[in-house]
Image (tube, rainbow, N blue to C red):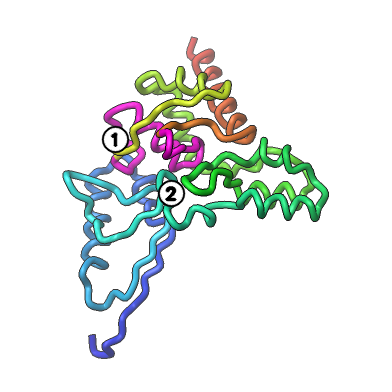
């Protein structure tokens, strides 16, 4: 380090390899080792800030990147109110536009944290305001294909749990065994935890329960289940 200056690393979608190369443990380990060698205990690193859907991948007994402070959908800590729009923010916006606040909640509210119990999907709120119409604005990405896959697998009776949540029920879950990838599952709780990180389920850390958030997400589950049922019909 000739200049004696340190660098700030900003890495968006750090977990792209984990999502797009789900079946390649070798590639995932190589990628994690690369990040560890690049960032951990290096004198040129002032700060490393990474964003993504999944928490840092675990393999073996320890994480390859155990030097990070993590904020995830199961534990947002001090970032809770910045995960989406708060109820206060949404109410102020919709009063300005004279839109129905209760209807907004039924469509886009539901993320639940320790201090902030009502967090709204920010993208969907913005779209509803801009178009002045309540509808499903959920962003379709590769995670929708994952949702269909897990429902088809019916891992550990997942379909029965989804049916229970579909009518307003909750399912108790242990999030600690999740290995922070989209492929390795030991128990059903791992799949449910993944769906929390993907945004399809809300997690109540006080009760250790998951549930389907709102109308928007209900429609996503209904679509995935109808596609899966159609595929079975085609096979028959």
Q: Is residue 161 left or right of residue 47?
A: right
Is label 2 in contact with label 1 (beta carbons under 8 Å)? Answer: no
Q: Residue at x 39, y 51 (%)?
A: 16
Locate residue 4 relative to residue 158 in the image: left or right: left
* Pointer 1 residue: 184
CA gap, disc 2 to disc 1?
A: 16 Å
| Residue 26 in picture, x, y percent from top left | 22, 47
The range drawn in magenta is 179-207
Q: Say which of 81 and 68 sits in front.
A: 81
Across and down, in percent, residue 178 comes to: 31, 38
Circle 1 crowding by C-alpha within 10 Å: few under 14, some 14–19, many from 20: some
Position of residue 19 relative to residue 33, above or below, is above
Image coordinates for residue 168, horizontal then vertical, percent: 57, 24
Query: On the rendered structure, is 1 left or right of 193?
Result: left
Tell me the SS state at disc 2: loop
Q: Residue at x 29, y 35 (%)?
A: 184
Compared to residue 194, the image places residue 51 above or below, namely below
Q: In the picture, residue 154 is in which quadrant?
A: top left
Where residue 57 sits in the image (x, y, percent)? 29, 48
Please name the residue that numbered disc 2 is placed on: 53
Q: Nearer the viewer, residue 126 or 99?
A: 99
Location of the N terminus (image quadrant): bottom left
* The label number, if any, that marks residue 205 in the structure image: none
The image quarter in which residue 96 lies: bottom right
In reply to whether residue 196 is colored magenta, the answer given is: yes
Crowd class of label 2 (few under 14; some 14 to 19; many from 20; radius 10 Å): many
The structure residue drawn at horizontal position 36% and vertical position 23%, both measured from the top left corner, is: 155
In the image, residue 41 lies in the stretch drawn in magenta: no
């Amino acid at each position: 380090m000739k200049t004696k200056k340190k660098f700030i690393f900003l890495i968006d979608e750090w977990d792209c390899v984990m999502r797009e190369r789900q079946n390649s443990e070798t590639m995932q380990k190589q990628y994690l080792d690369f990040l560890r060698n690049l960032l951990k205990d290096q004198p040129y690193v002032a700060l490393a800030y990474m964003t993504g859907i999944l928490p840092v991948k675990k393999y073996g007994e320890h994480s390859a990147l155990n030097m990070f402070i993590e904020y995830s959908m199961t534990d947002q800590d001090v970032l809770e109110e910045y995960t989406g729009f708060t109820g206060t923010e949404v109410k102020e916006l919709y009063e300005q536009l004279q839109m129905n606040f209760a209807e907004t909640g039924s469509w886009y509210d539901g993320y639940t944290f320790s201090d902030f119990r009502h967090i709204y999907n920010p993208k969907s709120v913005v779209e509803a305001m801009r178009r002045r119409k309540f509808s499903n604005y959920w962003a379709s990405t590769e995670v929708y294909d994952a949702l269909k896959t897990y429902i088809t697998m019916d891992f550990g009776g997942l379909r029965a749990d989804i049916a229970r949540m579909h009518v307003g029920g909750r399912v108790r879950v242990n999030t600690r065994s999740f290995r922070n990838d989209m492929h390795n599952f030991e128990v059903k709780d791992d799949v449910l935890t993944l769906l929390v990180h993907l945004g399809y389920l809300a997690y109540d850390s006080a009760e250790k329960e998951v549930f389907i958030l709102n109308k928007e997400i209900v429609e996503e589950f209904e679509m995935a289940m109808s596609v899966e049922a159609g595929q079975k019909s085609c096979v028959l």
